[in-house]
Amino acid sequence: MGDEVRATTSQYLTFTLAEEQYAVQVYDVKEVLEYTTVTRVPRTQEFMRGVINLRGSVVPVIDLRLKFGMGETEKTIDTSIIVMEVEINGDTVTVGTLADSVQEVINLDEEQIEPSPQIGTRINTDFIRGIGKQDERFIIILDIDRIFSEEEISMVVEEAVAR
């Protein structure tokens, strides 16, 4: 029984965006950084906040709040950059995403995760892996590989590298 439970439990890094709880699978996360200066890249989409230097590598930084239509992330003492690896067409790309705050790593069993809600045909929820339930709170579990289209990631990476 113990092995079965471990096989159906996954670890997630939880964070907040506009006072809502979100999570991504831990294996997608490379590291969490304190907010640092982000260099703006001209002529990029609004959600592309700029680039950072991560140990000699140029890493694009994305504002998930802007991407989700929630308004720009404000810099506070809790603002963090979650550095993740996103897979697009078999290629792994490193991106940073802004979070209002990073909470904790939690374990969720498959039974604690409901499927992604279907909200009509006009709203795309493909990037939501499911809704996790822990205690009395709901956590929106993101499928980080499906948040951005191939064109968006390609454009962000090309702009960052061109810099």
Image: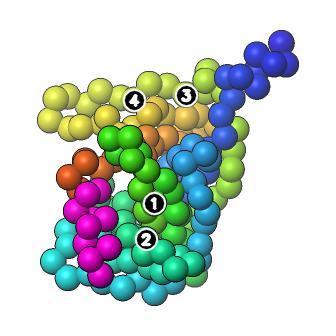
Q: In this view, does 46 lie above or below 107?
A: below
- Residue ID for mark 4: 116
Regarding residue 66, the answer to whether it shows in the image is: no
Tell me what residue is drawn at x 57 percent, y 78 percent: 55
The answer to which of marks 1 and 2 sits earlier in the sequence is: 2
Report the mark closest to the observer, 1 or 4.
Answer: 1
| Labelled pair 3, 1 in contact (Cβ < 8 Å) | no
Report the mark closest to the observer, 3 or 2.
Answer: 2
Residue 158 belongs to the span the image colors magenta? yes
Rendering coords of residue 162 (x, y %): 26, 77
| Labelled pair 1, 2 in contact (Cβ < 8 Å) | yes
- Residue ID for mark 1: 94
| Labelled pair 4, 2 in contact (Cβ < 8 Å) | no
Amino acid at circle 2: Val
Mark 4 vs mark 3, CA separation in Å: 9 Å
**Within-10-Å neighbours for mark 1: few <14, some 14–19, many 20+:** some
Give the prevailing secondary structure in the magenta stretch: helix
Mark 1 vs mark 4, CA separation in Å: 25 Å
Write the start and end of the magenta stretch as one range: 153-163
- Residue ID for mark 3: 113
